[in-house]
Image (cartoon, rainbow, N blue to C red):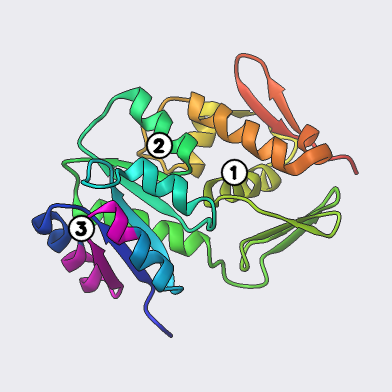
Amino acid sequence: MDKPKILVVDDEQRMRKLVRDFLVKNNFDVVEAGDGEEALDKFYDDKDIALIILDVMMPKMDGWSVTKEIRKYSEVPIIMLTAKSDEKDELLGFESGVDEYVSKPFSPKVLVARVEAILRRSNVLGDGIKEIGGITLDEKAHEVKIDGNVIELSFKEFELLSYFVANQGIALSREKILNNVWNYDYFGDARTIDTHVKKLRNKMGEKGKYIKTIWGMGYKFEPNQ
């Protein structure tokens, strides 16, 4: 089985080496880029990249601009690295299409665990196919069909829908959704959930109404049978 290929983008060579060494040690292939423009060139040239680890502050193009450009063509998972911890920056990252947000300084072991968790969830063993209320969710292919038509979801939107489907009929608080979809150690603003739910509902069209809002708490997934 081929090793998953990770694109590591950071203008600091020492940081790239640190991340690369830990990834290689954990059986990943690594491609490096030192700025945003080089990152896009590497990404478009290599169709096997499974995940991107992307710094925010870089010359030529910052991480947000790179993310927005990539999201025009691909839903590849993106982990954003940043020295900032401002809530607005995190929200901007998620709204741009980032899947995970890791603040510097960070533990390389934790970063590798995040990478492994994302790739593991996107390649579930077994057929991983769930059908409910006109929605077909294929976890192994990471594909969603509504009434037989494929809809394009980001990695996090897919994870969110998968979590809703697995917990249909159950009232889910925003905190519980954050802990399960964004990992237990993510301390982000709960408004991140609202942003992703809004996008998911829009992409689901008429089926978006299956995601019910519970005011003051969170959401409940109730498909029509």
Foreground disc of the pair 2, 3? 3
Percent position of residue 200, x then y = 66, 39
Spatial CA span between label 2 and label 3: 20 Å
Image quadrant assignment for residue 185:
top left
**Magenta-span inclusion, residue 35:** yes
Label drawn at residue 15: none
Percent position of residue 66, x then y = 38, 49
Q: Mark 3: which amino acid?
A: Gly
Residue 39, relative to residue 132: is it above or below? Answer: below
Q: Earlier in the sequence, mark 2 or mark 1?
A: 2
Residue 133, relative to residue 175: is it above or below? Answer: below
Percent position of residue 60, x then y = 25, 47
**Magenta-span inclusion, residue 191:** no
Spatial CA span between label 1 and label 3: 32 Å
Decide if residue 100 is on the left or right side of residue 28.
right
Q: Mark 1: which amino acid?
A: Leu
Percent position of residue 148, x then y = 84, 60
- Residue at position x 35%, y 24% in the image: 87
Label drawn at residue 160: 1
- Residue at position x 51%, y 50% in the image: 71
Decide if residue 5 is on the left or right side of residue 106.
right
User: Residue beneath label 3, please?
Assistant: 34
Q: Residues within 10 Å of mark 3 (few under 14, many from 20)?
A: some
**Is there CB contact under 8 Å for labels 2 and 1?**
no
Along the viewing direction, whichever of 45 and 19 lies nearer the viewer: 45
Number of numbered tags placed on the structure image: 3
**Mark 1 secondary-structure assignment:** helix
Spatial CA span between label 2 and label 1: 17 Å
User: Residue beneath label 2, please?
Assistant: 93
- Residue at position x 68%, y 71% in the image: 127
Q: Mark 2: which amino acid?
A: Gly
